[in-house]
Image (tube, helix red, strand yellow):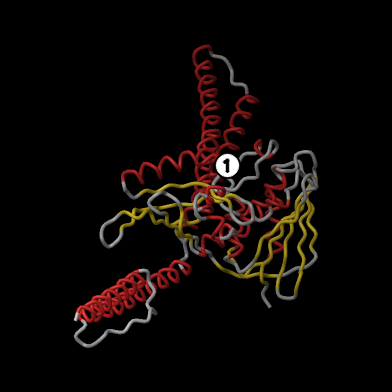
Amino acid sequence: MIGSLAESISSIATTNKQLTDAAEAIGKGNFNVPFVPRNDDDVLANAIIRMKDNLKRFTREIEKSKEQFRQVADNAPVMIWMTDENKQCNFVNKGWLRFTGRTSEQELGYGWIEGMHPDDYSRSAEIFDDAFNSREQYSVEYRFRRADGSYRWLSETGAPRYSTEGKFEGYIGTCVDIHEMKVHEQRRDNFIKMASHELKTPITSIKGYVQLLLNMYKDHNENKGQFSSQAIQASLTTIDKQIIKLNRLMSELLDLSRIDSDRLELNMQNFQLNDLITESVEDVQQTTKHEIIIKNGTICKVFGDRDRIGQVMLNLLSNAIKYSPKTNSIEVNIYQPAKNCVAVSVSDHGIGIDQEHHQKIFERFYRVEGKSEQTYPGFGIGLFIASEIIHRHNGSLNVKSKRNEGATFTLTLPILS
């Protein structure tokens, strides 16, 4: 009797040990642990089996959710990151890795800090720490190193994340490359400053010479003196030049506004391109000491806005004169590079343009920086407007140039068959 009782107690202890071990293994995620209830009435064992099935299902759902998150994050058009509750990065998506050119292991923890521009780290870290400590959303802009080694401006937004139980688990955020926008904003700000200066210069000059003429008129009335015809002519000539310059600047601003609002209208017609080039050269020749030589390699008609194409030619000729102050010759060449198009090139022998600026000079607000270039007036939108006009004629505008070796600007237009 006692022996049977002892065997029963031992059997119960063994069974309980098996149940305990099975429950512990299941709790750790081992759902393959061998475990069979003694019978249908084994309540505890059956409960553990149900627990195993539920945990297994929940685990699969969690893994499925994690995998879905990874797929969404990796295919998102932005860089995505996450931190734990100790501020250490514990996830970056493929967009982040493509941008940085580094591995996930290199970026996790505090490794990502290596990519931030040293001048932006302190400010960005302070913003992040303040938001992290107060559990608030934040936004910050900073420069970050791309895979090619260049620093790009990023816009980062982060927000706290919590578990389903409301426990704080860290931050999640996105980064968007805004480098082009920042560059454009900087050029716009520079343009506004420059425009203010460029507009004030002719106005101040006009005001000064008008004041001079008024004083001369006053002296004549009070002292019965005589006007100096030479002084009057010089003053009026200067005023006329400044008014022309002011009108040109205002026209450029108006054209820029029309382009931005897609309201740059073209009055299309058939016309002789050679006649337009000759007229443009004659107009410019009257105001410069440069000798402008026309080479008519072909004679053809085009379909386009005569005045707008003339505007482009005046811009190219004016630039050629402005940027070749130490030489006195400019060549205009009209030729056919192909059967269905005509090209007009304007070549000078001036200061030239480095290769790195060849495409950028056709962007709005872009001006080549340098000691010599800064001495020349202008908004930095003339070539942008010229390029837009030519492109709207299904043509092209490009440049070939080297520093200190002059420049050749070539516009190409389709011709009438």
Residue positioned 52% across, 60% down in the render: 96
Residue type beneath disc 1: Ile
Tally of numbered tags: 1
Residue 21 in the image, given as x and y percentages of width and height: 34, 72
Question: Residue 212 location, x and y as percent?
Answer: 54, 22
Q: Nearer the viewer, residue 338 or 129?
A: 129
Q: 339 and 294: which one is in front?
A: 339
Q: Could you classify mark 1 by the number of other residues whose Cα lies within 10 Å: few (under 14), some (14-19), or many (20 or more)?
A: few
Location of residue 369 by image quarter: top right
Q: Residue at x 78, y 68 (%)?
A: 298
- Per the image, the residue denoted by label 1 is 244
* Left or right: residue 31 compared with residue 292: left
Residue at screen point 54% across, 26% down? 208
- Above-or-below relation of 178 to 229: below
Q: Is residue 56 left or right of residue 365?
A: left
* Side of 11 relative to 338 (left or right): left
In the depicted structure, whether residue 367 falls above or below residue 4: above
| Residue in view at x 50 percent, y 37 percent | 196
